[in-house]
Amino acid sequence: MRRSTIVLSLVAFAAGCSDPATTPADDGGSSSAAASSSSGDGGSSSAATTAVDSSGGTSTGTDDGGSSSTTGEPPAPWVWDLPPGFPEPYVPAQNPMSAEKVELGRHLFYDLRLSGNGTQSCASCHDQARGFADGLPTPQGSTGSVLARNSMGLTNSVYSYPLTWANPNLVDLEHQILVPLFGEFPIELGAVGHEDEILQRLRDEPVYGPLFEAAFPERDDPFSFDAVRDALACFTRTLISGDSPYDRFVYGDGELSESALRGMNLFFSEAVECHHCHGSFNFSMSVKHANTVFDPQAFHNTGLYNVGGTGAYPLGNEGLYESTALDTDRGRFRAPTLRNVAVSGPYMHDGSIATLEEVLDTYAAGCRNVTEGPFAGDGRANPYKSGFVGGFEMSPQDRDDLLAFLHSLTDETFLGDPRFANPWP
């Protein structure tokens, strides 16, 4: 397939071939990301990345958390350094980007002192080598509480809308980050009741004085949880991945294997229909950016469960239904990005599928029939299942080709980028 044809195809998918009421996701198909940053629904998380020239951008921000220099010079505007084909991210006006906030956020992201008992950081559940996921079916918080949902990876979370598996109200990082910090059901970082202690730990660390002052020069006392929140949000927004073999093939001079090319054609075909939920530049239709003009939220029931044949999902893991109480929203979850999906397993909203091979087999079968146990029921017959999850014919060669294509979405540069790495000795 010609590169120009592929690019035009991606533009078409990004324009919106998914109906939020009917299009499925890989159900949660792609995995990963955070015990330390789940959401009100157990979902996506908070993160922070780089050093002064952060991943997504160079330069500094302005205004209320602005990054004016300590010499009183006006702050330089933040400039995004984006991969080809990526739109400018949306950034809320009350927390403009700055290199100083990004660098502070990177330090906070990797700091155990941010948890109430000093045992867990954001990075404890967001491993850079795993696309900022954690490799567990469901994560544990700092006190041992087990979360209900798989940790969704932080790859390109700046474009995710909403930020979690199924909570339509958590749409910006500033609000999402408060959940792992202060949430109690379950406890993640467990900051409640330890607020003063945590801030004092940060004040006692010599590295933090200059970092907080540079990030928030307009504040008399920059040490606050508002500052922590804003810095973590800025760092997370820089975690942008767009240098995979697939990207280099589409926008540069890179090559894909014959198998990956066949898999790409299958992926974007009506035969398997992956692209209906995993389209756009980010391989997810739930995307928001600076120029978004409509509500991009999309949730999908993929037939992973059908408890008792009633359309139900396991209690406490019922998806969008938990926010709307509409039966038709039972089991509906957001489709995550497939970028770096090969390293971010296990998969689905509850981490119940271990490998990509199993994910493909499950979708080819029209999803899953649970034959025993408390969640028994034929998900293939779930009355609320998306019409796009009807099963498809898949030969062994087709399976290998789809896997080769999914592996071509792995961005090794991103996974090892020192700008996103632990800054502490």
Image (cartoon, rainbow, N blue to C red):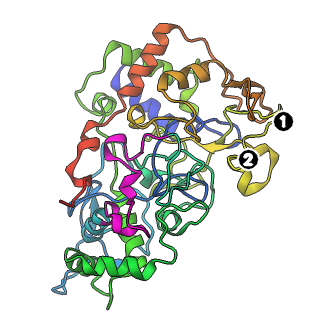
**Residue type pointed to by label 1:** Thr
Which label was assigned to residue 310? 1
Magenta segment boundaries in residue numbering: 108-136
Residue 168, position as x, y percentages in the image: 63, 56
Q: How many marks?
A: 2
Q: Is residue 264 magenta?
A: no
Apparent side of residue 313 relative to residue 270 in the rendered image (left or right): right
- The mark lying in front, picked from 2 and 1, is 2
Query: In 3D space, how far apart are the residues under numbered discs 2 and 1 (Cα atoms)?
Result: 13 Å
Residue beneath the point at 35% across and 47% down: 127
> Where is residue 20, by image quadrant?
top right
Apparent side of residue 403 relative to residue 308 in the rendered image (left or right): left
> Where is residue 341, by image quadrant?
top left
Q: Are marks 2 and 1 in contact (CB under 8 Å)?
A: no
Q: Dot 1 surroundings within 10 Å: few (below 14), some, or many (20 or more)?
A: some
Q: Is residue 340 above or below residue 70?
A: above
List the residue tagged with mark 2. 315
Q: Is residue 207 above or below residue 258?
A: below
